[in-house]
Image (cartoon, grey):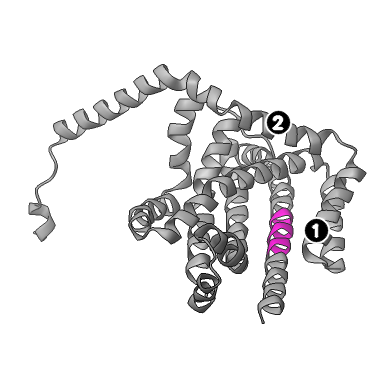
Amino acid sequence: MAWWDDFPAMDSQWLSQLRRTIDGAFRSFSREYGEAVELAFEPLRQFLLTSERLLTQSPWPVVMGGIALVTWLASRSTKLTLSTVLILMLVGYFGMWQDTMTTISMIFVCTMVALVVGLPIGVAMSRWERLQRLLNPVLDVMQTMPSFVYLIPVVMLLGIGRVAGMIAVVIYAVPPVIRFTNLGIRLVDKDLLEAADAFGAATWQKMLKVQLPLALPTIMAGINQTIMLSLAMVVVASMIGVPGLGQPVLKAISNQYFTMGLFNGLAIVGIAIVFDRVSQTYGKRLQKHLEVVHG
């Protein structure tokens, strides 16, 4: 007999009671405050719908030109810009333009929300050790928890749809921004901070003019990871009604449509490559610029 056979198991009746208590409390909270929570997220829903309409209802040459312009401004790479245009043309040629634009709008909004939430938390963690010790286990749980688990409480509160998917995506994708912002600020050379102190810089001036600019390359690496995680989670979020490329993939799995799944999967890969290359190239350009300025 193995030693673990004698290990005292938790009383099943007590455990069942605990589960029922927690589930009942959460259901009561959802019934009581569900509408208030939905109302609180209404501005985000409108922002998402506006972004989606802008990309899906504008003429495709205008949208393609705008994406190509943003790609070139961020990377200053003609090769990368032409590759982006080619990927978008192939997406349109195979009839996936609408779903692709919907997915891009979702990723854009989720990334913006993650930055608004994550950057201040990362800055705060870099300033207070106690807050860092408190939040690090929370971030570990957020990054290791299976993505499907996030969908359960969000759907119970907000129902099926775009907003629930957006919140689940943000929860899953925000930890890299927080961690890399904290790390980037902590890696700033102490001599530069002492020089700023010698010139009489206030705390907020050191943060805005010294620490954040020098931490930008590291922060950009975190943004890159957030974008990739957002894209991965958008596909999972299609299970709760989030439109985009994830829904055809889900339909292909359910109905064994190999070609549909393959084409939409390749479209997701194409978008991921574009976002990854553009954000990485922009981060490298920032780093070179800062080396020239401070070199």
- According to the picture, the residue beneath numbered tag 1 turns out to be 71
Q: Is residue 220 magenta?
A: no
* Residue drawn at the location 61% of the way across and 42% of the way down: 253
SS of the residue under disc 1: helix
How far across and how far down the image is residue 209, in percent?
61, 63
Q: Residue shown at 56%/71% (left/top)?
A: 199
Quarter-wise, where is residue 208 in the image? bottom right
Relative depth, front residue between 68 and 44: 44
Between 83 and 217, the one nearer to me in the picture: 217
Judged left or right of residue 273, residue 68 is right
| The quarter of the displayed image where residue 83 is located | bottom right
Q: Tell me the amino acid under the disc marked 2.
A: Leu
Amino acid marked by disc 1: Thr
Q: Main secondary structure of the magenta part?
A: helix
Instruction: Report the span colored magenta.
Output: 269-279
Report if residue 105 is visible in the image: yes
Q: Nearer the viewer, residue 169 or 160?
A: 169
